[in-house]
Image (tube, rainbow, N blue to C red):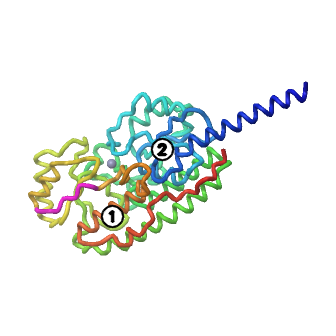
Amino acid sequence: MRSRRLAALAVTMGAVVALLLTACGSKSDEAVGDGLRGVQSSFEGNDGRLKVATTVAPLTSIVLNVGGDRIRIHQLIPDGVDSHTFEPKPSDAKVLSRADLLIMNGAHLEGTTEKIAKQNLPHPEKIYYLADNTLQGDDERSGFLYDFSFPRSEGDPNPHLWMNPLYALRYAELTAQWLGENDPDNRDYYQQNLARFADVLKRIDAAIQQDQASVPQQNRKLLTYHDSWAYWARRYGWTVIGAAQPSDFKEPSAQEVGNLVAQIKKEGVPAVFGSEVFPSKTLESIARETGAKFEDRLRDDEPPGAAGDAQHTYVGMLVEDMRIILTALGGNADETSKIPVANTFERGRSSS
Ligand SMILES: [Zn+2]
């Protein structure tokens, strides 16, 4: 009787092991590919890994570089979608209902997503805010910034902290801390991944510091369509002289366009920058009228290339943006372009 039971147990255990192996095999692409391949996990089933929901692509890339292949990730806001006005779908609520935690930017970027998360997460207190744990207050030199598309009168600060690689480093540190708290068995692994990723972020910060100095002093000012460069500019001592997009994310009025044209002429801005996610005929015509060069491929929430490409990462996005901005304004991005863009997390060490 006893041996028969043991034999049955052995068979069951064998089946469980086989199942686990199959599960690991079929899930192996979920977060271990290059770039952001497979970060749309449905969180169905349970393979022992932490289920981490994220919002925009750059934050997802940061979380992936820390969590590596020991977490499952679901990026709620798809690449190339306007994160500022994003409305989650019922299917997002379903995924959130299976998530262990949500790591989001905060600073009022993902209002509706936050609301849906509070209603659907099994543990609604497991919402983690990156921006709000990076900056406090509104000191112009060290706090949140209010500017063109994010005026103080509306109460929503500029949320694009991650465009400054040192704030991205803080985001990675917070992520390692939160993943470790929720999954203590893998705390060391997350810390090791953090160390590797931090090294790249510090290198790109130094490279940008060096490259931006190749731009003539009088050209170190930005006029963009989407207002996402405030924290980058503060880091490197540049000036954002304007952003064409109004705070309601519609197109600027005739009067606002007139003001921008006058400003560009007065400041002698050599180039103006549109973005991938917000194609703007208005900025294009402003450029034509003022004689400024028009570059329309800046990115702040969509990494370049396709899912699975090596450069489809946060670092890849920053490298590409630097190439566009610095060369258009008369400098170069020689040092920045040497930075490795691919994911840096340690692979094949899944504990499940
Ligand atoms: Zn944005």
Residue 38: which numbered mark, if any? 2
Q: Give yes or no for residue 71 being in the magenta stretch.
A: no
Query: Which residue does the image show at 42% across and 70% down from the upper left?
Result: 206
Q: Secondary structure at mark 2?
A: loop
Q: Position of residue 227 (x, y in %)?
A: 28, 52
* Front label number (2 vs 1): 2
| Side (left or right) of 138 relative to 22 | left
- Residue that protrudes farthest toward the left in the picture: 289
Query: Which residue does the image show at 58% across and 51% down from the upper left?
Result: 177
| Side (left or right) of 30 relative to 207 | right
Amino acid carrying mark 2 in the image? Gly
Residue 322: which numbered mark, if any? 1
Q: Position of residue 350 (x, y in %)?
A: 63, 49
- Please say if 230 is above or below 253: below
The kind of secondary structure the magenta stretch mainly shows is strand
Disc 2: residue Cβ within 8 A of ligand 1's nearest atom: no
Q: Which residues are magenta?
A: 291-297
- Whole-Å distance between the Cαs marked 2 and 1? 27 Å
- Please say if 40 is above or below 284: above
What is the count of numbered marks? 2
Determine which quarter of the picture holds residue 82: top left
Q: Position of residue 324 (x, y in %)?
A: 28, 63
